[in-house]
Image (cartoon, rainbow, N blue to C red):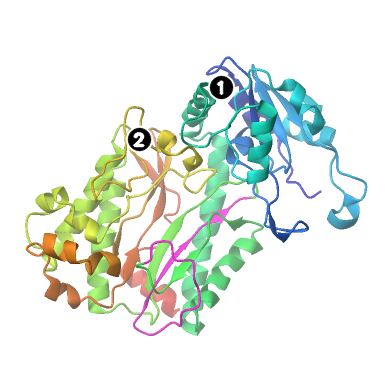
Amino acid sequence: MLIPQTSSSLVDTLRQRRQKLASLIDFPAILWSGSNSPRNFPANSFAFRANSHFLYFAGLPLANAAIRLEAGKLELFMEDPSPSSALWHGEMPTREEIAEQIGADVARPMAELGSWLEDAATIAVQDAATWTQQSQLLNRWVLPQSLPQEIDLELAKAIVFLRLTHDDAALTELRKAAAVTVQVHKAGMAATPQAKLEAEVRAAMEGVIIANNMTTSYNSIVTVHGEVLHNEHYHHHLQPGDLLLADVGAETETGWAADVTRTWPVSGNFSSTQREIYNVVLAAHDACIAKIYPGVEYGDIHLLAATVIAEGLVDLGILRGNPQDLVEMDVHALFFPHGIGHLLGLDVHDMEDLGDLAGYEEGRTRSDRFGLGYLRLNRPLRPGMLVTIEPGFYQVPAILNDANVRSTYQNVVNWQRLSEFADVRGIRIEDDVLVTTEGSEVLTAALPNDANIIENLVNS
């Protein structure tokens, strides 16, 4: 059996999710799983990842399938495996067997889907072949993120409402992903003293994920150039004075993600300047987590991080002025240009295929301020939400060497003092934090972030 088995409790959860959706919409919804995308010829494809909205209600990563949801019922559409597929892929379950696994009410061939589309809403799938099929079968443009049909927008809003908070079945999977990710980062630290290239540390980290029959939830970042926020190159040599920034997360068989970053010294010992900046970032990280409660605005959490970082940089003599005033001027964003974090769930940036519909409370739009424009989540926190907290400090040449930036902030940045911290390219500390009824729970708390303990883990 090449498809994960489901439990009776998961089947019950899937039925409950469908019933909740039925209470929010009064029209049918059809969700496609997506199809394999070829790398360079059809038989050599990228690893398949089912669409997350499909996964939320179907529970299994089925390729080339669709589900029709109406009044709490689920109809599964997919073809039975061809006789020849057993040669290449092994024995596969039939459509009826899969339908039983997920608690489907009806199972039909995919070829019959066209007869069940009337008045149905959907959400665009990312792969081009399936998106084309969606638009052709529905005889209208199925548009991602911007300008969707009104019925599709209503469906998207209903799914966002459901997926913003996690049920017990989801949390079980998210805890599994978090636990493996803790092991992943400890393996990376342990591998660093013997490694010559970033790639060797990446291999040690992703090897733990593979050994747990999981995949990475995004392309791993394992780099000595932490100033490149989404650095996906691994060819750089590790030098004794470098910091290694590792942003790596595991994803369970059914798609639930973790997202964790740690930064550690290649030599096993932070320099004095590296330690000073590291502790500024850690102070922001800890202050933000301490303020996570239901009803708190996530935007305020971001501003708290910005203020703590500004305070720390003032104390170090890098910035001049009152920290709150510096944040109002967006000075902090010279070194902390991104948001404090994002939603986490089936997607590592959960539901961002819907643009800001999930991340932003209705009626809110993105700021055009330098220090707020990259904020991915702008909602009041609710119990059951899982968010990341990931402050950072980066010396991005494209920002700091810009003549206009230098001119604008010449009186509030001590450029000479900043030059003394040249061995700090990038530092980020990130954990996965569940909002509870009474505060928060850090799902990745078993992974240390104290500088002394980090050094011990690398040196041991």
Q: Tell me the crowding category of disc 1: few under 14, some 14 to 19, or many 20 or more residues within 10 angstroms, Cα based.
A: some
What residue appears at the point 12 percent right and 76 percent down from the top-left corner? 416
Q: Residue furthest top?
A: 26
Main SS category, magenta section: loop
Task: Give the alpha-carbon distance from disc 1 to disc 2, as whole Å.
Answer: 21 Å
Give x and y (percent) for residue 101.
76, 35
Residue topped by disc 2: 381
Q: Quadrant of the C terminus?
A: bottom left
What amino acid is labelled 2 in the image? Leu
**223, 404: nearer the viewer:** 404
**230, 118: nearer the viewer:** 118
Mark count = 2
What residue appears at the point 52 percent right and 25 percent down from the top-left corner? 149
Element assignment for label 1 = helix
Q: Quick check: 238 above or below 19?
A: below
Using the image, tell me which numbered label, if any, was put on residue 95: none
**434, 316: nearer the viewer:** 316
On the picture, is 227 further left or further right than 3? left
Q: Tell me the crowding category of disc 2: few under 14, some 14 to 19, or many 20 or more residues within 10 angstroms, Cα based.
A: many
On the picture, is 123 further left or further right than 317? right
Q: Quadrant of residue 398?
A: bottom left
Report if residue 250 lies within the magenta region. yes
Using the image, tell me which numbered label, if any, was put on residue 20: 1
Q: Residue furthest right?
A: 83
What amino acid is labelled 1 in the image? Lys
On the picture, is 266 further left or further right than 332? right
- Magenta-highlighted residues: 228-252
Question: In this view of the protein, can residue 104 be seen by the observer?
Answer: no
